[in-house]
Amino acid sequence: TPVLDGLSLTAGYRYTWDFSSNWGQGFGTFGGCVAGFSGPNCGSAASEFQTHRLTWNYSLDYKLTPDTMIYARSGRGFLGGQFTASNPAGYQLVQPEGLTDVEAGVKSDWELFGIKARTNADVFYDWFNNIQESIGLVVPGRGVIGANINAAAAELKGFEIQATVIPVDGLEMGLNYAYEEGQFTMFNNPAANPHDQSGLPFRFLPRDKGTIDVRYHVP
């Protein structure tokens, strides 16, 4: 039907298995044993583990006109896990970190009074789970040690705008702006006081980002 002529659906799946084998040799001092290892002054430690995850990507596009398209997409990805023998019991296996996101937007080429322009805009929402954070763990007899563990979950949201204008042949003027905010919906940090740090802003996330550029193409 004419309504479906500009509609496009894309779907992809991937299933990934991670296998890891680790071996380490520790050497003691003054008859002691390096933390995380056992044996007579000292010994070796070996570990094997495997993780698996399903990832996917969906995209639905619809052309309103030959020059304007609206779309919606969603995807899932992950960061592989790991096994750290020197971590205390209960924290040695680090599960994969996961990210699920949804996005909707518009892409359009248009012209006004002979001036050509292009506008792209989108909104997005991201969900992180099993975030791998390097934090301090309080271990009896060892004090506070640094360890990478599954400590948090978070949600991020924002929007992006990209605009390009060609006022005369050869001259391009561009403006890009992005707004993003996020917070930890769960964050358990055993070395912090209080341990529950849920609600804190997501780390290393600038709220506002933008660029302005001007280009001239020499004939």
Image (cartoon, rainbow, N blue to C red):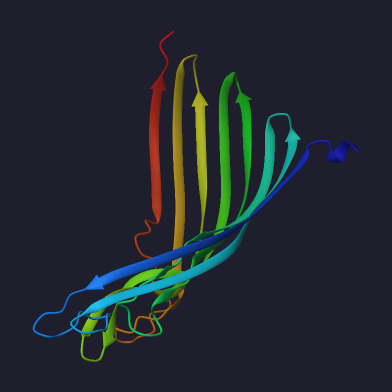
Quadrant into which the C terminus falls: top left
Give how far across and how far down residue 161 sits, in percent: 51, 43
Q: Is residue 34 left or right of residue 168?
A: left
State whether residue 29 is above or below residue 55.
below
Residue 133 position by quadrant: bottom left
Q: Is residue 129 visible?
A: no
Residue that lies at the very extreme toward the top in this rendered image? 219
Identified at 33% across, 87% down, the residue is 194
Q: Nearer the viewer, residue 52 or 178?
A: 52
Q: Let me know if residue 85 appears in the view.
A: yes
Residue 191 at x, y percent in the picture: 29, 83
Q: Position of residue 55 (x, y in %)?
A: 61, 58
| Residue 96 drawn at (x, y percent) | 49, 67
The residue sitting at 39% across, 31% down in the picture is 213
> Residue at the location (15% across, 85% down)?
32
Quadrant of the image for the N terminus?
A: top right
